[in-house]
Amino acid sequence: EVIDCDVAIIGGGPAGCTCGLYTARGNLKTVIIDKNPSAGALAITSTIANYPGIDPTTSGTQLLDNMREQAVNYGAIYRQAQVFMVDFGEESDSDSESADAPTKTVYTPELTVNARSLVLATGALGRKPTFQGEADYLGK
């Protein structure tokens, strides 16, 4: 499958879904590419107790699902796929507008996405567990 779009977003966490929500609402054809909706710091959080406006019994997975659903409801295309290569295209010497900017191409085993703009919202890795048994309780 090949998708041509205005904005490709690599990462389906809070930053990627928020970006997708705003670009889709701005009538830009948007594709969110997420390697795994159950990965990341928020996804492994059992309850969200310190996020304004969220019921404190909401899990990280529920919050992510809501964010993703909201972006999709506004028109973002969501695909679960592992990115293995990105081609940023050739830079030109001209001072042309973004319509003439090089196409960025994102490659996954399942699809290829050609975009005028690319957003990297891949998150950050947290620290490794530092004491014995900590990994057993991570996210609980």
Image (tube, rainbow, N blue to C red):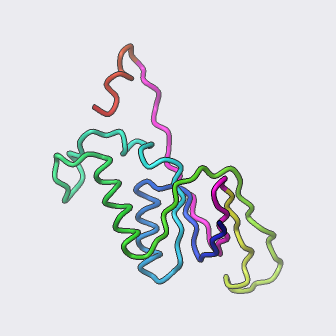
Q: Residue 15 appears at what percent x and percent y?
A: 44, 58
**Majority secondary structure in the magenta region:** loop
Magenta highlight on residue 35: no
Residue at x 47%, y 60% (from the top left corner): 16
User: Quadrant where the C terminus lies?
Assistant: top left
Image height check: is 14 above or below 132? below
Q: Residue 30 appears at what percent x and percent y?
A: 52, 72
Is residue 121 visible in the rendered image? The answer is: no
Image height check: is 122 above or below 99? above
- How many numbered marks are there? 0
Residue 65, quarter of picture: bottom left
Is residue 89 visible in the rendered image? The answer is: yes
Residue 63, quarter of picture: bottom left
Which one is in front, 124 or 6?
6
Side (left or right) of 93 relative to 64: right
Q: What span is in magenta?
A: 108-130
Image height check: is 55 above or below 101? above
> Residue placed farthest to the top in the image?
132
Residue at x 46%, y 67% (from the top left corner): 19
User: Quadrant where the N terminus lies?
Assistant: bottom right
Which one is in front, 30 or 108?
108
Which one is in front, 72 or 102?
72
Side (left or right) of 106 relative to 136: right
Side (left or right) of 7 relative to 129: right
Side (left or right) of 116 relative to 53: right
Residue at x 39%, y 23% (from the top left corner): 135
Which one is in front, 108 or 139?
108
Magenta highlight on residue 119: yes
Image height check: is 135 above or below 28? above
Q: Residue 7 appears at what percent x and percent y?
A: 57, 72
Q: Residue 110 appears at what percent x and percent y?
A: 63, 56
